[in-house]
Amino acid sequence: MFSILKKEIRSFLSSLIAIIVIVVFLIANGLFLWVFKETNILDAGYANIDPLFDLAPIIFIFLISAITMRSFSEEKKSGTFEILTTKPLTDMSIIMGKYFAGLIIVIFAILPTLIYYYTVYKLGLPEGNLDNGAIWGSYMGLVLLSAGYVAIGLFSSIITDNQIVSFIVSMFLCFFFYSTFDYLGSFAIFKNTDFFIEWMGISYHYRNISKGVIDSRDIVYFLSLIGLFLWLTKIIFSSRKW
Amino acid sequence: MSIRVENLVKTYGKQNAVNNISFNISSGEIVGFLGPNGAGKTTTMKMLTCFIPPSSGRAFINDMDVELQAIEVRRQIGYLPEHNPLYTDMYVKEYLQFIASIYQLPNATKRVAEMIELTGLQVEQKKKIGQLSKGYRQRVGLAQAMIHNPSVLILDEPTSGLDPNQIVEIRNLITTIGKEKTVLLSTHIMQEVEAMCSRVMIINKGQIVANGKPEELKQQFSSDIILMVKFNQALSDAQLKELRGFGEVKPIAGAEYQLVGKDEEAMKALVFNFAVKNQLMLSEMKVNENSLEDIFKNVTR
């Protein structure tokens, strides 16, 4: 698993995908948090970095799909899939290697935003006057959400040998799981089941954790989502044997 | 037995890609796997390397089942897939190091250096794989297949698309390495088989149609002796008629004739006596041996 993980991270870095993703993520967030009028922290008057946590899930829909789209598609297209699968590696160790490589890149994109936290911390009046619980909860939620997106992205990559298809499917699935259930839940026709429908979406649980209340049910939700998509990936991965 | 295959079948839909084949390869053999395109060579190799499982039947590498002990089997084989897929954006050394790390080789750096030397990649070792010519890529593919010193090598068309010099180089490389290993290689080039292989298997429509040493096959499949004769001048009709009395004669061009018969020595004697009697000079006489190519054409028709 570690040899795959190492190789993936190196190829992310050498193909510049990782760097582009990290830079784009940080520039977009920087602009929305500090420059654009509507979402500007400095003008808002409150010492928090909520705009970051509202925005990041949307940006990640694009960026994480871009990171994961090539992980299996490219191997399939170039035939190196056959090299990997005839080496003494279990299917799961290949998948997990690629999964953690993607997740590590995403975490490296999130880490620099701690500078924003530090800035707001210093700007608070009095200094350090901000809701730490909510912020750390939000960071945890963001990491869990990214972990879910990466799993979705890997699944989208294994189903096709075309990177563009994989990218679009991944964006669709991430968006679907992030916010569609919210909209569905707001329709009147679902009446009493609306809570359950909202509960199925990522954003419901993400909001919960963002409040700083770490509920085991939310954690279990994210872990199940990740597990589900990695399991589906494993099934498709082994489908060459059918 | 290094490779043992028992009643192997692979079906795609209704089509039998590999239809009930069995063979044994003992260690140290270099076996050439021949067959027209789509005969089932690659499918067989993919099953032996645990890429796809057989529909029925069993295959063993070093007495380990390819289905039940897949990971252990993969440790023991070196595989060069068809078209030699490679990570084109990796450096040669980086790629070999990556493969070495998959096999968890204890002294990976040393082993990578050895492979680079063995396959003659020294000059190219700092380049990206994408920048290499086809011949060098093939060497990277071979280096990748042999880095963990496997006892069984499975090479799917190792020399396809190379120029004649490169073919000879890769061939020498395989023969050198093949001295202590079992090698199963597929190819379309008959001379290659005759130059390298101790045994030939010909597969057609998913079934093995010939299996044996090249010389054995030539004997087994040869029927008629073809004698090519060249005189110093074209034969007159009367002379031709006389020669026809001995057997089937076919004029080729000018003073060249082709005789078909059963007994090589008797035919030679006949032609010689005929020439002496008619005061002709024999400028050429040779037996056209049944080449592997002819056998191939015969059994795969």
Image (cartoon, rainbow, N blue to C red):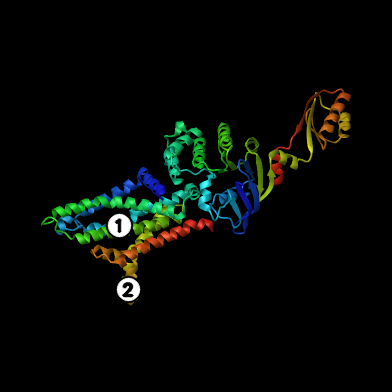
x%, y% of residue A135? Answer: 22, 59
Q: Among all residues in the image, which is located at the extreme bottom?
A: A192
Q: Is residue B145 left or right of residue B21?
A: left
Secondary structure beneath label 1 = helix
- Name the chain letter of the residue that bears numbered label 1: A
x%, y% of residue A115? Answer: 21, 50
x%, y% of residue B296? Answer: 69, 42
Q: Which residue is mark 1?
A: A143
Q: Is residue B261 above or below residue A50?
A: above
Q: Residue at x 64, y 44 (%)?
A: B34
> Is any atom of residue A35 visible in this view?
no
Q: Is residue B243 above or below residue B205?
A: above
- Identity of the amino acid at label 2? Asp
Tell me the mark number nearer the camera, choosing from 2 and 1.
Answer: 1
Question: Which of the pair A242/B133 is nearer the observer?
Answer: A242
Q: Which mark is residue A194?
A: 2
x%, y% of residue A157? Answer: 42, 54
- Identity of the amino acid at label 1? Val
Question: Which of the pair A81/A45 is nearer the observer?
Answer: A81
Number of labelled discs? 2
